[in-house]
Image: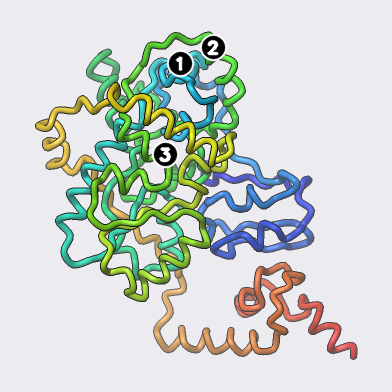
Amino acid sequence: MDFSILLDENKCKGCTNCMRKCPTQAIRIKNEKAVIDTNKCIYCGECIKACPYNAYTPYNVNRSEITKTKYSIAIPSTAIYGQFPIGTKICNIQNSIKKLGFDYVYDESYAAELASKVINRKVNSEKEIKPLISTNCPAIVRLIKIRYLSLLDNLVTVESPMEIAARLAKYNVHNEFDIPLEDIIVYYISPCPAEMLTITNPIGAKKSSIDYVIPLNSIYGDLFREISKSENICNNEPSIEGIKWAISGGQCETSKLNSSISVFGIENIINILEEIENGKLNDIDYVELSVCTEGCVGGTFNVENPFLAKRNINYIIKTNSEGMKSNLETSKFEELFDRNFFDIEIINDDFNKDNLSLAEAIEKMEHIEAISSILPGLDCGSCGSPTCRAYAEDVYNGFANLDGCILLKANKKN
């Protein structure tokens, strides 16, 4: 799998809704069908939400393959706990996952708590670069790589809880059950298309410890049916601090930082990134960003309304605040920290592969501006590009010609 979002051309009507919502202008309408430029796509899922014809669907794992692996581990996103009716026991959810054919369920919330500790340490030790930016949302990291290269150094070098959990889960199963690492397969149950791509196209230098990603909505019905039959015995004890990562602001709260903000929603995030780029937020230590509404509980592959899911998560936190606590020994955490177990090295993918000199880049920009000046500037989308400026770039790159602008054609006839 090298792409997490699939387009069914038979369902696509070329309506331009997805094209207009795409934050990186990765979508064009060609021959009345949407076309995605995978080099620009950040897998945020905005196209899935915008399409009225359900033409976009996630790549899915063949679940029959689960039982064929020698030993399978399922790691559910912390957001999963907000997807069930209020009062549903976490352990019942874990057991319903296990009944789908998995051998072991490992709770991501524990890894999220560890990530919070690392973030606290890294933010407090950083004296030069402010603010540091969260790396938990891979769509945000890809957005920065494409549109805000100057902010790459602001990304905090902490692996996502998803990856930390996968490494710990493999380690635990290997040691507890004496199963060779090569015989262990890790499945991540995800609310997010961006997370699906991290296994084949990681945002960091290391190979992912996750083998397959399963969209949560593809198994939700089966999970819901199994909930009432499941025992209230946890496979892996959750962490209340870690569960807070499911909702916007959770990272900031659990990392116990002096000056931080949390922002969700792609338009809000773009505004914040531009302010950081302009040096307006250097009095803030940490910025937590999530593409989805209210954080991961608003992920594209979730089923519950994000505001209700947030309420469900807060109910779990409130009613279990004394019962779920980290069991990691301080000495073990220090050992892992010293081994750089939690670190991520962000790859600069160099999406600008033209490798133009400054003079060539200026010349290119001047050509695009010249083309753009001819266009009406209405951003009507009839040409199949999201804006007149984007259309000018398409014309310059040879992907389109000026005859595609219906207003120019109409003016010529007059």
Residue type, mark 1 in image: Asn
**Contact check, label 2 and label 1, Cβ < 8 Å:** yes
Q: Residues within 10 Å of mark 1 (few under 14, many from 20)?
A: many
Q: Residue furthest right?
A: 414
Q: Which mark is residue 92?
A: 1
- Of pointers 3 and 1, the one earlier in the residue sequence: 1
Give the secondary structure at mark 1.
helix
Distance of mark 2 from mark 1, alpha carbons?
A: 8 Å
Q: Which mark is residue 228?
A: 2
Measuring 80% from the left and 81% from the top, which residue is drawn there? 407
Q: How many marks?
A: 3
Measuring 52% from the left and 62% from the top, which residue is drawn there? 267
Measuring 49% from the left and 16% from the top, which residue is drawn there? 96
Q: In the drawing, does residue 377 fall left or right of residue 241?
A: right
Q: Which mark is residue 246?
A: 3
Q: Residue furthest left?
A: 331
Quadrant assignment, res 15: bottom right
Q: In the drawing, does residue 280 fall left or right of residue 48?
A: left
